[in-house]
Image (spheres, rainbow, N blue to C red):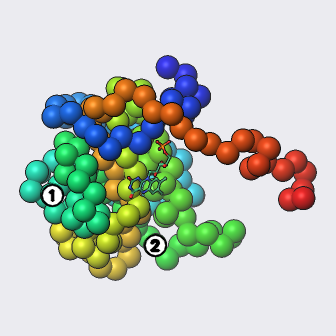
Amino acid sequence: MRVIDSIRDRFSVRKYIAKEVSKEDITAVLEAARFSQSAKNLQDWRFIVVKDKKMRNSLAEAAKGQRFVAEAPVVIACCGIGTDYVMTCGQHSYNIDVAIAMENMVLAAYEMGLGTCWLGAFYEDQVKKLLGIPENDVRVVGLLTLGYSAVKTKIKYRKPLKEIVRYEKWS
Ligand SMILES: Cc1cc2nc3c(=O)[nH]c(=O)nc-3n(C[C@H](O)[C@H](O)[C@H](O)COP(=O)(O)O)c2cc1C
């Protein structure tokens, strides 16, 4: 599968079949995160892999009741560390670095026949408490569900290039 095909065809999976993801496959997905680029090669990320059903139920509650979080066999809490570091451009590196790693996991999973959904709608304080994540200098950037999709394809809406691209100058 070409990268561009994965990018084009991947979609957010919010319905999963009841099938475990093997340890090897979870590790392969995590390797995609590990090989990601990061600012100054800081690798300022930590990933907590959650398989426990009770914990997934609690995470679903912390994610504003999004039930598919409990139904997916795996949830990965994607955290940033070294959260004080700001790049010259004024952006914190950790959230960008974690986002890149998350997207690489999303694409790797898709290529392996696995579905994912990125979650930003969750109460960070609740997730931290549930997973024993330190209060300071660690942020939960996103949750990622992982499992076998119950849905095969999805029609995606995207803005046309002419709406989102300018050449040479803003206007
Ligand atoms: C930063 C971010 C946060 C998101 N948060 C959620 C979420 O909390 N719940 C959810 O169901 N989908 C969430 N999504 C998935 C988006 O809704 C989805 O990517 C978008 O609608 C495009 O659909 P597609 O992924 O199927 O192409 C999130 C995606 C991103 C990138």
Give the image quarter of residue 33: top left
Who's the residue at 84% across and 50% down the image?
Answer: 166
Residue type at the position of mark 2: Thr
**Front-most of 12 and 45?**
12
Who's the residue at 15% across and 57% down the image?
Answer: 57
| Residue 15 to residue 96: above or below | above
Under circle 1, the secondary element is helix
Q: Which mark is residue 57?
A: 1
Residue type at the position of mark 1: Asn
Q: Position of residue 88 (x, y in %)?
A: 68, 70
Return the residue at label 2.
83
Under circle 2, the secondary element is loop
Q: Residues within 10 Å of mark 1 (few under 14, many from 20)?
A: some
Who's the residue at 25% across and 67% down the image?
Answer: 62
The mark closer to the camera, 2 or 1, is 1
Contact flag, marks 2 and 1 (Cβ < 8 Å): no
Who's the residue at 37% across and 26% down the image?
Answer: 152
Inter-mark Cα distance, 2 to 1: 28 Å
